[in-house]
Image (cartoon, rainbow, N blue to C red):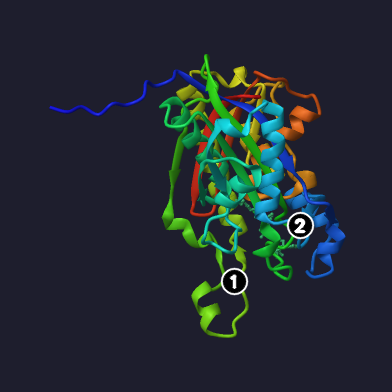
Amino acid sequence: MSRLRVPRSRTGSRVHGVGVYRPTRVVGNDEICARIDSSDEWIRRRSGIVTRHFAGPDETVITMATEAARKAMAQAGTDQGDVDMVLLASMSFLEQAPAAAPRVARALGVDAGALDINAACAGFCYSLALANTLVRTSEAHTVLVIGSEKMSDITDPEDRSSAFVFGDGAGAVVVGPSEEPGIGPVVWGSDGEGHRLIAHNGSWLSTRHTSRPWPTLRMAGPEVFRWATRVVPEVSRRALDAAGLDVTDLAAFIPHQANVRIIDSVARTLGLAPHTVVAKDIVRAGNTSAASIPLAMDDLLSQGRLTSGDPALLVGFGAGLTYAAQVVMLP
Ligand code: UT7
């Protein structure tokens, strides 16, 4: 009987480099408040956000992803020939088809499989888990995992409950083989029952056939807030258990940057040790959906608050509803 030949699995994969792209234009709360009944004080107090970046016409999901990935490859010392898969997490790529990832791969000069992944704000952690599996099973040698979002394209600047929340940007990591495991098992899941809690306010199809405006995001903020503060600590604990670590082992906690009050609440519930650095890139970048975790990771590393090899807990959560968490050794 014939037997299929399968490649030998590797024991480990890890993150070898991180890179980001932050759009040039920085937008303060006062500019947002020109279109909604709000204030800088309220936005800071209820969300922690002080500024966000809005991309210009030449800063697209594709160009931002390409720049972030280029920097991650440079940091990792990755050659174009090593990359055989590009996973691009995004919920704001308006073209939908063809996917953005093949164009990013081409711009980078890599000859690789390429696909887009939409798990909203959990997309980076989902993609990282897939990359880990691809590398460990030797289906891929090196995978680029990118989160790139132009949330300003799908946000209504006149919607008081979300206009101040979102920002644009991209972050990328290089995942490749390693002797020691550097990416822990993922804990992930979804609850489609809550799909309307963060959703577009219309159908793309009706936009095509009528003169209705382009759909934009609507968020039932308080309901999502309650869901996040319940689910994120539970998923985080399961990811720590799966990695065989105690909460006191963590050098960093890098959750999706949705709200400083969510981050603080989860940090308290988890009982993080005083030495654990908690990412709060949201203060300057807003909520950048699938890009928020690599942006926050790069921020802490470039400030010198963390070093290579430090264990960090990542947890993404958002529309869908979707969530995913894993512990990684930082690049
Ligand atoms: O990334 C995916 C996952 N997303 C999240 O996890 C987001 C979770 N949700 C949140 O972060 C928060 O719900 C928001 C930051 C979006 C909103 O903050 P909140 O404290 O939940 O506000 P709220 O909607 O409960 O509104 C509280 C009050 C209300 O007034 P009353 O009824 O107490 O008089 C609102 O009318 O604040 C009012 N309000 C505002 N006031 C000034 C609502 N939006 C605004 C605003 N400016 N923009």
Question: Circle 1 sits on which residue?
Answer: 215
Viewer-nearest residue: 177 or 210: 177
Left or right of 304? Residue 74 is left
Task: Find out whether the residues at labels 2 and 1 contact each other: C-beta distance under 8 Å.
Answer: no
Write down the quadrant of residue 214 in the picture.
Answer: bottom right
Instruction: Report the residue at 43% width, 51% height from top.
Output: 191
**Foreground label between 2 and 1:** 2
Helix, strand or loop for disc 1:
loop
Instruction: Report the residue at 55% width, 50% height from top.
Output: 102
Question: Circle 2 sits on which residue?
Answer: 55
Q: Which mark is residue 243?
A: none
Q: Callout 2, which amino acid?
A: Ala
Q: Is residue 2 visible?
A: yes
Where's ligand 1: which quadrant?
bottom right
Ranked by sequence position, the earlier of labels 2 and 1 is 2
Give the Cα distance between marks 2 and 1: 19 Å
